[in-house]
Amino acid sequence: MDGTMLGFAVPHLSESLEPTSSQLLWIVDIYSFILAGLLVTMGSVGDRIGRRRLLMIGAAAFSATSVMAAFAPSASALIAARALLGFSGATLMPSTLSLIRNIFPNPQERQVAISIWAASFAIGGAVGPIIGGLLLDHFWWGSVFLVGVPVTVTLQILGPRLVPESRDPSPGRFDIPSSALSIVAMIPTIFAIKMAAERGIDRVGLLALVIGASAGAAFVVRQRRLADPMIDTRLFAIPGFRRAIVANLVASFGFAGGLFFITQYFQLVLGMSALRSGVQLMPAVVAAIVMMLAAPALVRRTGPFQVMTVGLALGTIGFATFMIVDLTGPIALTTLAIAGAYGGLSMAMTVAIDGIMSVIPPERAGAGASVSETSNELGIALGTALLGSVLTAVYRPRIDQIQGVPQNSIEAARETLGAAVIAAEKLPSEVGGVLVNGAKLAFVSGLHTAALIATLALAAVTVWTAAAVRKNPSVSGEPVDARQRPGAGEG
């Protein structure tokens, strides 16, 4: 819910805090970057201290940092608050999924539970646009961060009474070097991708990529040598497990990237209010909920890869449709495309998550959940960073081509479309109209390019996943535990 509302709040906080385009991307990205970097560590911590205990700690921290974000006085302060939210969120995500793995050992019950768990995110997405729109129409942008506080407080009250505790009875030693390597591997790598997409390859980006890749390689080597690894790397030798991870990542990539530019398209190009743009996304959220809840029955009838393939194909078609939108819509077609894309991607993610968790032994559920959530959050971060940066890279040169507008206004408009609207308000109406219209055209051009990249990525993974329908490998199977040392690649 917070993520959905933040997307709608971007134009409002842009006007209030006046962030640069880089700061705006960091405001959106930093939560997922930090969260993804810490998921492996927090999943392992939950296995040791208790998943419910970690969930309660995370809920308290999330409440406090949400208040910090709501009252951030500057873009830099908001970035810092979002980073702390990412730290808090990293304790919540693996805890919930690992608790489900232990509470529902039966595969069919687990599939239903995971579909409901996943649908709860979509329900939050459904409530988010409406509540967020109402708040943004009547209050300041920071109010969207306070909505989750009553929920996390309620969780702290009811959680100890309703949720059974579970932990690994023989967790082994917590490996601090592995934790550090997982963090260093994740964050610099994503930073390098973001910088390359925004301003091209430079020394800073290359250095970050080398650091991230080196740390990632060292992490893998260390996991293979440890008697009690944080992540059993032999899981990735299972073909179905690999496909589930990639499907989850790419679906999340499209989901988050699409939300980033579609919300701005609705509000800044089509001129919708935050509330109306939220209502416009309701069909997509309803489609996501329906298809998530239908996923277990469809898997039983056809098979996991058939369902994942159909879901990814719907996402591909939806993003391809985004490439034909213009300054006026068409609104009905855009709404239908979003519904198809988000419904399909949500279904694919639900099946992929169950496939990932099915090969993880219950006592290692926290570590397994961290793998699933890391792929999900990495996809979200990459979707926003890469597609957002590509949009910016196309947007700026086209802004420079606008004629008849003062250079200082052009420079301001280069930052974001929201900044262009603000700059236009300070100009005579005719000149301001030229700037706004040119900026909207530039934004739509960037949207088309970003949609093309998302379409190609989704299409490639759709074809790859479809190949598994013919080969018919099992996504799930007997849980794999490094401490039992079965042969690598079996399953």
Image (cartoon, helix red, strand yellow):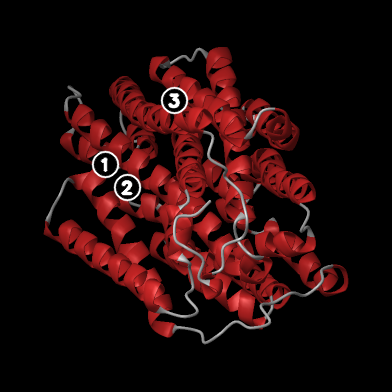
Residue at label 1? 412
Provide the secondary structure element on which disc 3 rests: helix
Farthest residue toward the bottom? 173
Residue 345 at x, y percent in the picture: 56, 34
The front one of 170 and 334 is 170
| Residue 271 appears in the figure | no
Which numbered disc, 3 or 1, marks the residue that appears first in the sequence?
3
The residue at the point 32 percent across, 65 percent down is 216
Q: Is residue 143 left or right of residue 201?
A: right
Distance between the alpha carbons at the discs numbered 2 and 3:
17 Å
- Label 3 neighbourhood size at 10 Å, few (<14), some (14-19), many (20+)? many
Residue 180 at x, y percent in the picture: 38, 77
Amino acid bearing label 2: Ser
Quarter residue 222 falls in = bottom left
Farthest residue toward the front? 487
- Which of pointers 3 and 1 indicates the residue nearer the eye? 3
Which numbered disc, 2 or 1, marks the residue that appears first in the sequence?
2
- Label 2 neighbourhood size at 10 Å, few (<14), some (14-19), many (20+)? many
- Label 1 neighbourhood size at 10 Å, few (<14), some (14-19), many (20+)? some
Amino acid bearing label 1: Ala
The residue at the point 20 percent across, 40 percent down is 408
- In this rendering, the answer to whether 156 lies above or below 135 is below
Residue at label 2? 21
- Which of pointers 2 and 1 indicates the residue nearer the eye? 2
Determine contact: label 2, label 1, CB under 8 Å.
no
Residue at label 3? 269
Provide the secondary structure element on which disc 1 rests: helix
Residue 29 at x, y percent in the picture: 42, 54
The dot on residue 209 is none
- In this rendering, the answer to whether 179 lies above or below 151 is below
